[in-house]
Image (cartoon, rainbow, N blue to C red):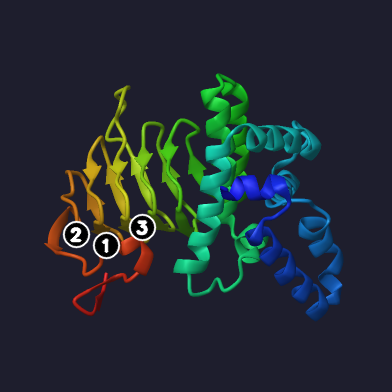
């Protein structure tokens, strides 16, 4: 049984864990008890809680939080892949971020997680040809979270976006599973040309803070891109590169650097 099927059946270990964590927090901080109840404990599932939390942040005078909530709920109900990837994203934070020791933390507080889930709904809308609404959701998410992801960008599951401020992902970008990125990363184009013009990031890649990857180029599986690097050419799988312009300087010790989050080269910081 998949995690989304667990949610529907009422037997969802991840959701039960989140509720237990939040009850503990509510006991420790009674002043936040109403917040914890409204954000988590009053909902029947992880999907319902996420829809509520995103809608509370994204609603405005143009589109109310209730209207956005209805859109978010519709997308999650109709896209099993979206639900599965969202759960893998949430788990990735606990596995990779040393500051995240509870499953409830990304759901409640992490704007990288929030921005990514808003994108997943915008991408669903885009594929349903509801592109005006998809672009509206993108715009609101960019304004609220400081993260700009085009609705057409294709993003796999198990993605961890740490801190997230200033992240930009262009329209024709493709990101594989189990990728980790930090703040101020750009997956951009190199000019005003139309068509397929953005990077393809394969599985297990780690992209450190401030890296800029530009053009329709491939970053191979298991690669590591150093902080503030400028990448303009294809990156071979399982290589480490740094610099402006970026150059290959070695090979990561890990098959998937994204999982270990070790941002060093031979013991030195990237």
Q: Which residue is mark 2?
A: 241
At x 61%, y 70%, the residue is: 102
Q: Is residue 267 above or below residue 102?
A: below
Task: Tell me the quarter of the picture where residue 136 sits.
Answer: top right
Mark with earlier residue (1, 2): 1
At x 42%, y 55%, the residue is: 184
Mark with earlier residue (1, 3): 3
For label 2, the SS is: strand
Q: Residues within 10 Å of mark 1 (few under 14, many from 20)?
A: many
Residue 264 in view of the camera: yes
For label 1, the SS is: loop
For label 3, the SS is: loop
Q: Position of residue 179 (x, y in %)?
A: 38, 54
Q: Quadrant of the C terminus?
A: bottom left
Mark with earlier residue (2, 3): 3
Q: Is residue 30 above or below residue 140?
A: below
Circles 2 and 3: CB atoms closer than 8 Å: no
Q: Which residue is mark 3?
A: 210
What distance separates the C-alpha of mark 1 from that of mark 2?
6 Å
Q: Position of residue 256 (x, y in %)?
A: 30, 61
Residue 226 is marked as: 1
Circles 1 and 2: CB atoms closer than 8 Å: yes
At x 65%, y 50%, the residue is: 6
């Amino acid at each position: 049984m998949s995690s989304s099927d667990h949610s529907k059946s009422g037997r969802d270990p991840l959701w039960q864990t989140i509720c237990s964590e939040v009850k503990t927090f509510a006991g420790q901080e009674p002043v936040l008890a109403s917040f914890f109840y409204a954000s988590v404990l009053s909902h029947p599932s992880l999907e319902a809680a996420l829809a509520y939390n995103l809608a509370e942040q994204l609603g405005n005078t143009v589109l109310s939080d209730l209207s956005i909530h209805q859109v978010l709920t519709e997308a999650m109900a109709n896209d099993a892949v979206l639900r599965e990837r969202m759960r893998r994203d949430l788990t990735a934070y606990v596995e990779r971020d040393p500051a995240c020791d509870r499953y409830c933390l990304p759901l409640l507080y992490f704007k990288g997680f929030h921005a990514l889930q808003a994108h997943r709904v915008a991408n669903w809308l885009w594929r349903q040809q509801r592109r005006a609404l998809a672009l509206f959701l993108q715009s609101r998410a960019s304004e609220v979270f400081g993260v700009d992801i085009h609705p057409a960008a294709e993003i796999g599951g198990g993605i961890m976006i740490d801190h997230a401020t200033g992240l930009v992902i262009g329209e024709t970008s493709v990101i594989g599973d189990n990728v980790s990125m930090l703040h101020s990363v750009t997956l951009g184009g190199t000019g005003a040309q139309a068509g397929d013009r953005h990077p393809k990031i394969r599985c297990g890649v780690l992209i450190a803070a401030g890296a800029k990857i530009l053009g329709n180029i491939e970053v191979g599986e298991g690669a590591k891109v150093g902080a503030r690097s400028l990448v303009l050419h294809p990156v071979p799988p399982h290589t480490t590169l740094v610099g402006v312009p970026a150059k290959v300087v070695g090979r990561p010790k890990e098959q998937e650097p994204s999982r270990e989050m070790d941002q060093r080269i031979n013991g030195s910081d990237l």
